[in-house]
């Protein structure tokens, strides 16, 4: 445990004037939330510029999508059969329902940005699982072309991104 005072630059944003006790776990969780908030804001700034919305220049720039409603997220999770990773859920609900980021843009949930074949996340995942997708819970999020995808493992706790090709995950 460490005594943290309100004038500490890392914790001054809490707005408390008294000294408080925070465990290492609590401090880490607060810093991660702050880092996530800054990341979400940086993404919002980037996608406001159409030329920076996606990285794949051979694809047309997707339109701006409204953030996903809770009903869309709950529907996608019901169709998938598991919960979306926490940070991915925040991207959908607090930034946009897909259409930004690497490759051809984040595939959205129901009502959001579709892949090149018009499928949103749960339909894309179901199609891949029935055809060739080797791992349950590995969500295809960003299409790079030539059967290469950036994916998140919904069952992992570390929220890492994997590259998946027809040769398997890397």
Image (cartoon, rainbow, N blue to C red):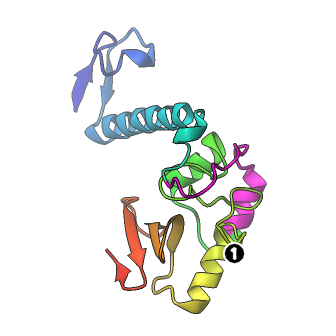
Residue 107's place in the image compared with 15, above or below, is: below
Q: In the displayed structure, does residue 69 sit left or right of residue 136?
A: right
- Magenta region, mostly helix, strand or loop? loop
Q: In the displayed structure, does residue 25 sit left or right of residue 97?
A: left
Foreground residue among 87 and 133: 133
Residue 162's place in the image compared with 64, above or below, is: below
Say which quarter of the image contains residue 80.
Answer: bottom right
Residue 169 picture location, percent across and down? 36, 77
Q: Residue at 22%, 33% (x, y): give it.
A: 1
The residue at which mark 1 appears reads as 123
Residue 112 picture location, percent across and down? 72, 56
Foreground residue among 60 and 63: 60
Foreground residue among 157 and 55: 55
Q: Residue at 52%, 70% (x, y): give it.
A: 139
Give the residues drawn in magenta, as a range.
56-77
Residue 28's place in the image compared with 126, above or below, is: above
Residue 22 picture location, percent across and down? 31, 30
Say which quarter of the image contains residue 33.
Answer: top left
Q: Residue at 32%, 15% (x, y): give it.
A: 19
Q: In the displayed structure, does residue 144 sit left or right of residue 63?
A: left
Q: Residue furthest front?
A: 58
Q: Residue furthest left?
A: 2
Mark 1 crowd level (few <14, some 14–19, many ≥20, 10 Å Cα): some
Q: Residue at 52%, 90% (x, y): give it.
A: 132
Residue 147 picture location, percent across and down? 48, 77
Q: Quadrant of the C terminus?
A: bottom left
Foreground residue among 97 and 70: 97
Q: Is residue 106 magenta?
A: no
The mark tally for this picture is 1
- Does dot 1 land on a helix, a strand or a loop? helix
């Amino acid at each position: 445990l460490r005594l943290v005072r309100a004038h500490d630059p890392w914790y001054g944003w809490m707005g408390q004037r008294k000294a408080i006790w925070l465990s290492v776990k609590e401090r880490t969780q607060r810093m991660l939330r702050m880092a996530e908030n800054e990341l979400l804001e940086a993404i919002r700034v980037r996608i406001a510029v159409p030329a920076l919305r996606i990285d794949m220049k051979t694809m047309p720039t997707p339109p701006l999508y409204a953030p996903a409603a809770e009903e869309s997220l709950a529907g996608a999770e019901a169709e998938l059969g598991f919960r979306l990773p926490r940070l991915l859920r925040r991207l959908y609900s607090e930034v946009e329902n897909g259409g930004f980021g690497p490759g051809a843009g984040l595939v959205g949930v129901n009502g959001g940005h579709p892949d090149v074949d018009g499928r949103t996340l749960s339909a894309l995942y179901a199609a891949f699982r029935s055809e060739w997708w080797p791992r349950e819970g590995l969500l295809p999020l960003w299409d790079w072309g030539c059967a290469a995808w950036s994916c998140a493992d919904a069952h992992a706790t570390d929220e890492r991104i994997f590259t998946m090709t027809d040769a398997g995950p890397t």
